[in-house]
Amino acid sequence: MSRVVVLMPAFNEADMIGDTVKASFDMPGVDEIVVIDDGSEDNTAEVAREAGAKVVQMEENSGKGAALNRGIAETDGEIYLMIDADLGKTASETYRLLEPILADQADMSIAVMRAPKGHKGGFGFVMKLSQWAVRKYGGNAVTTPLSGQRAFRRRLIEVIGGFEQGFGVETAMTIDALRNGYRIVEVPLPLTHRVSGRNLRGFMHRGHQFWDILKAVWRRRRKPRARR
């Protein structure tokens, strides 16, 4: 059996990470749960350890991509399940992302998530940019290229050269995987997580996200297709 490792980057998630880690232990076939504490200012690391996770601590807040690269470097998984730290009890549903990978029906699976009922979420311009970029530079359409809930083999990450820095992680990963001929499937899952609202903080978050994605896409506009 392939060794399956859960990678959970986290920054100031002490209020949710305990439930997320505990729910992850309910998933069949998972060998290890690793939380990468990205320089949190609260007790995220302590809560994660108490819940049973292995914790890798970054010296300072370096962003999601850097945290994930560190997680890959410090683990020996063959298959990885990448999930957000704020999924809470619904994290156990992400085991379904592993099924197409284990069955060799896909090289990467992506969760299709919906905003909570009654929540309008963001304005959609970040998602539209990501969808356009994946279609133009990856050559295929993906419904939710911003989803951070994914399963994939270690080899895929090695071939595409690791994770992009900043908030461009998911978009860049999707483009790079498609350029290398990897098969991607999307899996609808009943997950809940923290959603950026229509307020100043939410707008600033989406602005930062938009800029990071734009930079990641710009770097890939002439990047040749890599070889597997």
Image: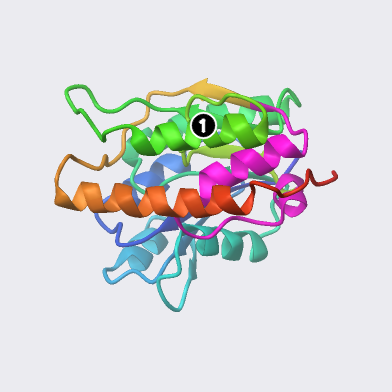
Q: Is residue 124 left or right of residue 175?
A: left
For the point 42% across and 66% down, which residue is it? 38
Magenta range is: 155-184
Q: Nearer the viewer, residue 19 or 94?
A: 94
Q: Looking at the image, can residue 203 be seen?
A: yes
The answer to whether residue 71 is magenta is no
Q: Position of residue 228 (x, y in %)?
A: 85, 43
Q: Looking at the image, can residue 109 be seen?
A: no
Kindly identify the amino acid type of the residue bearing the numbered disc 1.
Answer: Trp
Q: Quadrant of residue 194?
A: top left
Give the farthest residue toward the right: 227
Q: Position of residue 85 (x, y in %)?
A: 38, 49
Q: Nearer the viewer, residue 173 or 11?
A: 173
Considering the numbered disc 1 on the image, is that residue within a helix, a strand or a loop? helix
For the point 60% across and 38% down, which residue is it? 151
The answer to whether residue 175 is magenta is yes
Q: Quadrant of the N terminus?
A: top right
How many residues crowd mark 1 within 10 Å: few (<14), some (14–19), many (20+)?
A: some
Asked if 11 appears above or below 223 in the picture, the reply is below
